[in-house]
């Protein structure tokens, strides 16, 4: 019952924070249309698929390896999306509170740590990334399980630990899970029991291995997928992007230092680089460091983690941040600013330990005065910095800046929090209630000031426009695709990905953090899946290989529109509002037959496809020649005019093509070549080739035949088998343990 009350309390707090959006009928998700999760998270009838293993959802009707972590089942219930998002925040606060309660035996410490963690700015601004929030929620649960294992090693505790590890993996954000796992390894070393330490370590490793086995249904396909993505070789520019600007460090204690949640001197949201956990937790963490650093290994541990993660978040501005680029595992993940995740976690735990330290005895008048003086000095310094770095400081006085809502409210919260802390330092029990209330008000203000609050999406914004219905029907019938010039930032009428996938409009665009390298290079998509001029003017062959038929582009970009009209490759079809639709003059179908192949090394093949010219300078025509990286036993013949290929079945996991050719030839299918695809002709398996750098094809004999391309990923089936066997094994072990415990 006590746990239900705690869970209900954090659920109520989460609802209160997001109330402005919930009561307006909005969705707790990004309003800018850029998120990679739009088609999967918004629609309750879709399966939650955070990885989209093909890289770009509709570019190749790809292999979608879908999975169902237990909490995600809620997203299958109509109207339950907001419930799913809220559960992430509720679980984060709930598990953090239970963990700190286990460490301190203090309800006030548990409440303060739980609120600080769940409602920190890092968590709130990532409402647009629910997988981050859900992954973060399971870390305190994992440490709680370790504490239970220290007390008693049992089958039940091992099973719970394994389940938490699996859910952390399945929640869908590898970076947070890896960061948490690395810190947890160090935590296990520091917290090893004095007796039977080796046995306890073996049990912990075994529980983690069982958790990985439970999540093998995701781990094995991801391990197969990862080497084919751009993440396998991040360059320094990608790796150090979205690091914390050193000028933002003061915002750890004053989030609206520059007037809003933006980077200094810039207008873009700093949603990846905010680590404010509230003034009260910061002051309580300082108390923990001052009073318990020398006597408590836990305080020392989390202080070191907080300091190290802050240095890592600064990217190439620090030696440790630069070294991370060369550290295996850490160098797989970009956006160093997200190391503020470990900072937020550590400060929240330290806050709980600080509250517990004061609960055991007042801090004392002298130290209380010093802490209050330090808080007032930090406020004065922050206000001075706010005025000094404000973009319009030349026309503003300091008093006018303080009067603005963003800064003024922060000053009010600072004063209220400092007063609550002073009461808490001298009278811990009544002061605890005041300090938690002040923290909720403090972080709640930050939440409503973030941009997700101002323009929340609604279900109506996801309704398919007329253009989606018309062009979607044509493209599904022909098997061809549309390419949106503006990518995910386009208006709904331009059919932006990833919403176009929701509307069943085959598209070459789309944004996903795990992107297959070759299809991205072939499509010439930038970091946010926006087109470049080279893609539709200088690289028309890539459009042929992708079976592009239509292009949508908005009026705001006149220069590209003129270039499109003058290229001779496009014909204007219609203009809907300020969106222009163009059609290729001679688009390739989804599947076609070529009479000849040519073997090339990867580098030459890539250059040929991009430039549109063969190494000898002659034009490359994908209608008559397929480029492959290994020999295909095929004798060239002039069959182009007489051969035909028609698609009889086209879905995500199977494509059937009926062919007719008077001579042996080569069938090309504009689907991404990826491990797991198999080809068969008239029911008999045949070799499948990667051709034209990123798509696939097979050799066909003379006559009429049906060639089937099917996706049967061995990694997924093997992972599912391992997960299922692990579940069965754990159920049997727990049933046996329960029977033994009931035996007389």
Image: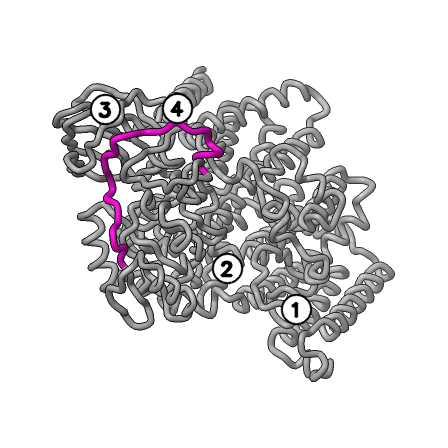
> Are the residues tagged 2 and 3 within 8 Å (C-beta)?
no
Q: CA distance from mark 3 to mark 1?
A: 59 Å
Q: CA distance from mark 2 to mark 3?
A: 56 Å
Q: CA distance from mark 2 to mark 4?
A: 60 Å
Residue under the point 72% across and 24% down: 194
Note whether 521 is above or below 281 in the view shown: above
> Are the residues tagged 2 and 4 within 8 Å (C-beta)?
no
- The span shown in magenta is 583-606
Q: Residue tagged by mark 2?
A: 13
Specify which label sits upstream in the sequence, 4 or 1.
Answer: 1
Q: What percent of the width, then of the height, locates residue 352?
A: 67, 49
Specify which label sits upstream in the sequence, 2 or 3.
Answer: 2
Q: What percent of the width, then of the height, locates residue 145?
A: 56, 34
Specify which label sits upstream in the sequence, 3 or 4.
Answer: 4
Foreground pick, 315 / 453: 315
Q: Residue tagged by mark 1?
A: 265
Note whether 155 is above or below 325 in the view shown: above
Specify which label sits upstream in the sequence, 3 or 1.
Answer: 1
Q: Secondary structure at mark 2?
A: helix
Task: Please state if 683 lies on the left or on the right of 235 as rendered.
Answer: left
> Mark 2 against mark 3, which lies toward the viewer?
3
Q: Residue furthest right?
A: 366
Q: Secondary structure at mark 1?
A: loop
């Amino acid at each position: 019952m006590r746990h239900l009350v705690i869970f209900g309390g954090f659920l109520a707090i989460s609802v209160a924070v997001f109330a402005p959006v919930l009561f307006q009928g909005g969705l707790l998700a990004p309003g800018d249309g850029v998120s990679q999760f739009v088609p999967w998270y918004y629609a309750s009838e879709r399966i939650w698929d955070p990885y989209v293993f093909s890289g770009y959802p509709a570019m190749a009707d790809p292999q979608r390896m879908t999975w169902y972590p237990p909490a995600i089942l809620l997203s299958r219930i109509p109207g339950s999306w907001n419930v799913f998002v809220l559960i992430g925040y509720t679980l984060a606060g709930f598990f953090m509170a239970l963990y700190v309660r286990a460490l301190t035996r203090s309800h006030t410490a548990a409440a303060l740590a739980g609120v600080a963690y769940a409602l920190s700015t890092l968590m709130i601004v990532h409402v647009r990334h629910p997988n981050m929030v859900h992954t973060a929620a399971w870390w305190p649960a994992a440490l709680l399980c370790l504490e239970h294992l220290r007390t008693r090693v049992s089958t039940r505790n091992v099973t719970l630990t394994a389940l938490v590890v699996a859910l952390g993996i399945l929640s869908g954000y590898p970076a947070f899970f890896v960061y948490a796992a690395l810190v947890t390894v160090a935590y296990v070393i520091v917290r090893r029991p004095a007796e039977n330490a080796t046995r306890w370590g073996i049990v912990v490793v075994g529980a983690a291995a069982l958790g990985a086995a439970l999540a093998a249904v995701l781990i094995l396909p991801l391990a197969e997928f990862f080497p084919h993505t751009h993440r396998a070789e991040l360059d320094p520019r990608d790796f150090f992007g979205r690091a914390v600007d050193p000028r933002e460090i003061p915002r750890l204690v004053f989030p609206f230092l520059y007037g809003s949640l933006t980077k200094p001197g810039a207008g873009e949201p700093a949603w990846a680089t905010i680590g404010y956990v509230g003034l009260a937790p910061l002051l309580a963490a300082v108390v923990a460091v001052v009073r318990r650093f020398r006597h408590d290994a836990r305080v020392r541990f989390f202080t070191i983690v907080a300091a190290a993660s802050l240095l890592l978040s600064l990217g190439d501005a620090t030696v440790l941040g630069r070294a991370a680029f060369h550290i295996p595992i850490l160098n797989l993940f970009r956006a160093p600013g997200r190391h503020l995740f470990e900072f937020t976690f550590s400060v929240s735990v330290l806050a709980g330990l600080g509250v517990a330290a004061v609960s055991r005895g007042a801090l004392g008048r002298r130290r209380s005065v010093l802490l209050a003086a330090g808080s007032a000095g930090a406020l004065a310094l922050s206000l001075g910095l706010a005025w000094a770095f404000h973009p319009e400081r030349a026309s503003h006085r300091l008093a006018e800046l303080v009067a603005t809502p963003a800064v003024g409210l922060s000053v009010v919260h600072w004063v209220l929090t400092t007063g609550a802390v002073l009461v808490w330092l001298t009278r811990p029990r009544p002061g605890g209630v005041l300090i938690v209330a002040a923290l909720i008000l403090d972080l709640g203000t930050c939440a409503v000031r973030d941009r997700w609050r101002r323009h929340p999406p609604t279900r109506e914004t996801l309704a398919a426009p007329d253009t989606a219905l018309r062009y979607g029907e044509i493209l599904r019938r022909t098997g061809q695709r549309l390419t949106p010039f503006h990518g995910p930032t386009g208006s709904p009428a331009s059919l932006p990905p990833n919403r176009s996938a929701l509307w069943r409009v085959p598209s070459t665009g789309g944004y996903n953090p795990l992107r297959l390298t070759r299809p991205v290079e072939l499509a010439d998509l930038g970091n946010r899946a926006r087109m470049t001029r080279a893609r539709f003017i200088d690289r028309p062959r890539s459009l042929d290989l992708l079976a592009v038929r239509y292009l949508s582009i908005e009026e705001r970009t006149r220069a590209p529109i003129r270039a499109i009209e003058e290229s001779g490759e496009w014909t204007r079809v219609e203009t809907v509002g300020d969106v222009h639709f163009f059609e290729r003059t001679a688009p390739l179908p989804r599947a076609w037959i070529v009479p000849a192949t040519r073997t090339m090394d990867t580098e030459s093949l890539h250059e040929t496809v991009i430039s549109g010219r063969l190494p000898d300078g002659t034009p490359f025509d994908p209608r008559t020649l397929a480029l492959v990286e290994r020999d295909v036993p095929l004798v060239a013949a002039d069959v182009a005019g007489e051969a035909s290929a028609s698609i009889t079945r086209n879905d995500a996991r199977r494509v059937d093509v009926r062919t007719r050719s008077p001579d042996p030839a080569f069938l090309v299918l504009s689907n991404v070549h990826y491990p797991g695809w198999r080809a068969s002709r008239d029911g008999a398996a045949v070799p499948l080739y990667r051709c034209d750098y990123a798509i696939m094809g097979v050799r066909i004999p003379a006559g009429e035949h049906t060639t089937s391309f099917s996706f049967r990923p061995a990694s997924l089936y093997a992972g599912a088998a391992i997960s299922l066997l692990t579940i069965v094994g754990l159920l049997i072990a727990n049933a046996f343990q329960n029977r033994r415990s009931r035996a007389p």
